[in-house]
Amino acid sequence: MRGNAFRGAPYGAASMLMLSLLATSAAAQSSVLSNVDLCNGKDRSSPEPQIRGCSELIKSESDNTKVLAIAYNNRGNAYTSQGEYDLAIEDYGKSVNLDPTYAKPLNNRGVAYRRKGELELAIKDFDAAINLDPNYIDALINRAEILEQQSDHSGALKDLDAAIKLQPKTDGAWNERCWARAIVGDLQGAVADCSEAIRLQPSAAAGFDSRGFAYLKSNQWDLAIADFNAALRLDPKLPSALYGRGFAKQKKGDTAGSKSDIAAAQAIKQDIAAEYAGYGLR
C-alpha cells in the first residue's frame, strides 16, 4: 500500500458524547469528570492518559451501557494509536456488544484489522458501520482505501463519490479519489481532485504527494518533482514522495539524485519499488 495511505489515526473516530452523558449527573464528582476528560482524549501527551481515564470509567460506570460503550471505543482508539491492535479489537468488540447500534466501534475495529493486515475482517466491519449509518464519511473512506488495495477501483470510486457528496470539505476523500482516478487513468480528474484536497488542507503532505503521483502517470516529470518537493517539505520521510521524486529524476536523467531518493524511500519502505511497479511505474 502506498506511503501516504492511512494517514495519522486513519479515520478512527472517538466519541465526545461521554461528557454530555456524565456532566449533569456527576458535576460534583471532580475525579469522575477528570476521567471523562482523559477518556475523551484531552491529554494528548501519549495514549496512556486516555487508557487510564477510560479504564476508570469502565470500573465506575457499569450501570450505564452507553457510557461503557463509549469508554471501550475510546480506549480501543488509544490502544490502536500505540499499535496494540489485539487489545483494541477486544475493546471495540465489547463496545459493539454493549450497543449494537453504535457505528463508531465497528469502523474503528475495521481500522485495527486493517493495520493487522486482516482486510476481509476490516471490510466486514466497515460494511456493518455503513449499514448502520449510510452517511458515515470515515467508514466510506476507509472502505474505499481497502477496495483500492484490492484493485476494486470502481467500488472505491463509488464510496469516495458518496463521501464527497455528503461532505464536500473532507480533504481526505478528495485525495483518495485523486489516487483512485490516477490508477484507472483519469489523470485530468485526478489532478483536479488533488488540487481541491490541497486547497482544503494546504498543510497536509498527502495532497501534494498524490498529485505528484498523478503527474508521474501522465509523464509530467517537472510538475511531479515540484509536488513531491512540496510534500517532503511537510513530511521529509514520506516514502512515496521520495520514491516518486526519484522516479521522476530518473526519467529526467538525474541518475545520482534518483538513486539517492529511491534508496531513502526503500530504507523506510523496503518493498516500495514493487508496489509502484504494480501501479505501472517501473
Image (tube, rainbow, N blue to C red):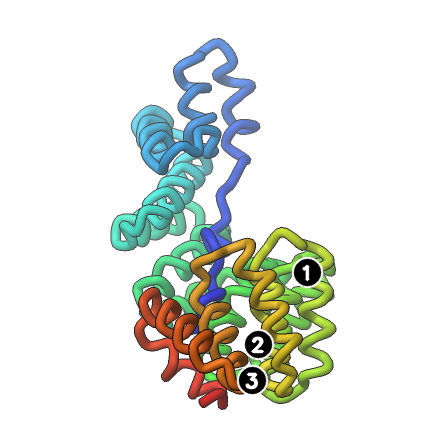
In primary-sequence order, the first of circles 2 and 1 is: 1
Q: The residue under label 3 is which amino acid type?
A: Lys
Give me the residue at 63% from left, 74% from top. 178
Give me the residue at 49% from left, 90% from top. 280
Quarter of the image holding residue 52?
top left
Q: The residue under label 1 is which amino acid type?
A: Ile
Give me the residue at 30% from left, 64% from top. 116
Q: Are marks 2 and 1 in contact (CB under 8 Å)?
A: no
Whether residue 62 can be seen here: no
Give the spatial CA distance, label 3 vs label 1. Answer: 26 Å
In primary-sequence order, the first of circles 3 and 2 is: 2
**What is the x, y in percent for residue 192?**
73, 73
Helix, strand or loop at label 2? It is helix
Q: Name the residue under label 2.
A: 213
Quarter of the image holding residue 166?
bottom right
Image vertical order of residue 186 relative to residue 170, above or below: below
Helix, strand or loop at label 3? It is loop
Q: Name the residue under label 1.
A: 198
